[in-house]
Amino acid sequence: MSKVEAAITVCNLEKKFGDLVVLKNINVKIKTGEVVCVVGPSGSGKSTFLRCINYLEKPTNGDIVIGEWWLRGTEEKSGSIHVGNEQVAKEIRKSVGMVFQSFNLWPHKTVLENVIEAPLMVKKIKKSEITKTACILLEKVGLLDRKDYYPHQLSGGQQQRAAIARALAMQPEIMLFDEPTSALDPELVGEVLNVMKELAGEGMTMVIVTHEMGFAAEVADNVIFMEGGYVVEEGSPEAVFNHPKTDRAKQFFSSVL
Amino acid sequence: MQDTIDLVFSYMPDLLNGLYYTILVSVEAIMIGFVVGMVLSVLRMGKSKIIKWIISVYISFVRGTPIIVQIFLIYYALAMIGLDIPAFQSGVIALSLNSGGFIAEIIRGGLNAIPKGQYEAAKALGMGNFQTLRRIIFPQVLRITLPQFLNEFIAVIKVSPLLSIIAVVELTRAAQRIVNTTYISLPFYIAIAIMYFILNSILEYAAKKVEKKTLLAK
Amino acid sequence: MNMNILEISLPLLLEGLKATLLISAMAICISIFVGGLIGGLYISSNWLLHGIAYLYIKIFRNTPFMVQVYLAYYGLPALGLNVDAYWTGVIVLALYTGAYVAVILESGLRSVEKGQYEAAAALNIPYITMLRRIILPQIMGIVIPPLTSQFIMTVKESSVLSIITIAELTMMTNKAIGITFSPFEVYILAGIMYWAINICIERIAKYFEKKAVRYQA
């Protein structure tokens, strides 16, 4: 039933900010239905790597292939490649959803309005139809009774769950999570992780940058440990957490686990 | 004293007519100024350094030189190009271009208050630049900056008397005309001072109410 | 730019510039005293004093400056005061600016914690002296930026005085245009001069701000 093929292929990815090289020669394959957790110390480039996938960051070198779409690395000055990439990115974003650390809900719209905005504007779905779908999604994340509330009236955990519903409304095949629980009070983290666990159980392809090791151990099929812009180790949670091969990985996990 | 009051009231129709034109000129100027300000703001978001530089010089000039100079400038400029535009329209243009500069700065302040994440969420969901600006960014900006717009409107009304110099028959010019025919000056200037005072006080009150409402909504 | 235009207009404009500088400087200095006085009255708990200040501020802020100029120009002679146009202009500009200065100072004064006022009262320091020597030095850093913007606006407002035939920069600009028939060039020249005044005001303000920030913790 599920084709074991690469949903996302990343080759020789490099990202520079001026002279600072933040991502160095990243090579990763993520299969359909896989849940991949990216972990590592601050400044390791995890978020930058994630944001390259939906082109919120523009790679300076290397390629990213998602389905039939191909993002090429741009040496800073090649304007024409960049323009082409923007078109490709638009297509990619139709099937790749993203959840941000700071939720980024739009404050002047209710929860329901936040969820239906993109399908309405981008996919041009009829309002009555999308409202039905949105309510189903909100029910799924446990926020149906709050659909007419404004973001500032919700707790952090509720806002993030709303943000997840908003991303799911576009029916993505891949979901990216950029430290989804890092900005939450500890007691609110669980409700968000539960939604993510459920999503994983349903077979969604997920790439999650996180510090929640327990969650990663439970849910991830694959763990990528990054440090200093490199992928230092990769493997199953069992392998990477409990039997790290490199010194840096050993150091990191001994202090966080 | 009673005679003076009767005299002023006998000319009230002319004064009220002038007041009407004061309000008309100000409303037209602020509306066009709003469009100018929005256009400048959107242009400033683009990539062209030249355009951004031109716009900042324009705004700097409009905010840094006296309005009376700008009014003259437009009046003469239009005459020089050969466009036979009546003083009223010329005044509206001058005031709009002036307001437009101030409004562009107001909008810029509003845009700065919007966190980058809002743009990113829209982008990640596949929304285009224009859609994002139209549905997400500018509705918030306008809500945040509404009190400042109203202040700008009040400022335009306070500056409208300067149009009397290019013979636009707003309230001050109306008074001047009466003064020239009756040779009585003080009572009429007091009368229009009172009229401006009432007008501005009402607007100030309305602006405070609106400010309270927009603060509550957040 | 046609050298002829420059030759004719530059001297005229410089004369006007001098007048504008002089008028603005005097008006600004007077306005600081006026504003300080009115601001002090405004925060007073005595309802009469507060009321007087409130009315003063409201009247000068809610009527157009141009109308105030006309009122003074025609009104002062009617009161028996025969002031010539030049000083009429300076006085009105000073009083007008003073109302705005009062508001700026008032919010600055309010920002000082009540204890400072109370300590001064307990030591029997007279009200005005307290404002001058204790409160004012503390609020310099807060009030200088808005005062700077206000004074820049005062210089711009001075151009309105050209309507009562005071020979300041704007009047001279129009005169120069009348002779040379080149509005654009002359206005740009005038614009540059006004802009230069702005820069000077900003520089002076920065100097005072630096001196003032010494007091801040």
Image: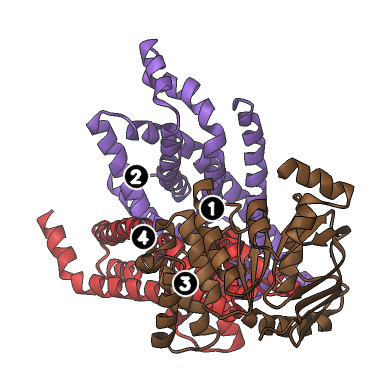
Query: What color scheme is it?
Result: by chain
Task: From the top left corner, tell me how far across and down residue A88 is, in percent.
Answer: 73, 84
**Label placed on residue B217:** 4
**Chain letter for the red colouring in the rendering:** B
Q: Report if residue C139 is visible in the image.
A: yes
**Mark 2, other Cα within 10 Å: few <14 / some 14–19 / many ≥20:** many
Which corner quadrant holds the C terminus of chain A? top right
Q: Which residue is mark 3?
A: A114
Q: Which residue is mark 1?
A: A189
Q: How far apart, in angstroms, are the residues tagged by discs 1 and 2? A: 54 Å
- Against B136, residue C10 (above or below) is above
Quadrant in which residue C116 is drawn: top left
Amino acid at circle 3: Asn
Amino acid at circle 1: Val
Q: Which residue is mark 2?
A: C57
| Subunit of label 4 | B
Amino acid at circle 4: Ala
Q: On the rendered structure, is A174 left or right of A77? A: left
Identify which residue, A143 or C115, lies in the foreground: A143
User: Which SS class for mark 4?
Assistant: helix
Q: Colour of chain C?
A: purple
Q: Earlier in the sequence, mark 1 or mark 3?
A: 3
| Subunit of label 2 | C
Q: Residue at x 67, y 76 (%)?
A: A33
Circle nearer the viewer, 1 or 2: 1
Q: How far apart, in angstroms, are the residues tagged by discs 1 and 3? A: 22 Å
Task: From the top left corner, tell me how far across and down residue B154 is, in percent.
Answer: 38, 62
Circle nearer the viewer, 4 or 2: 4
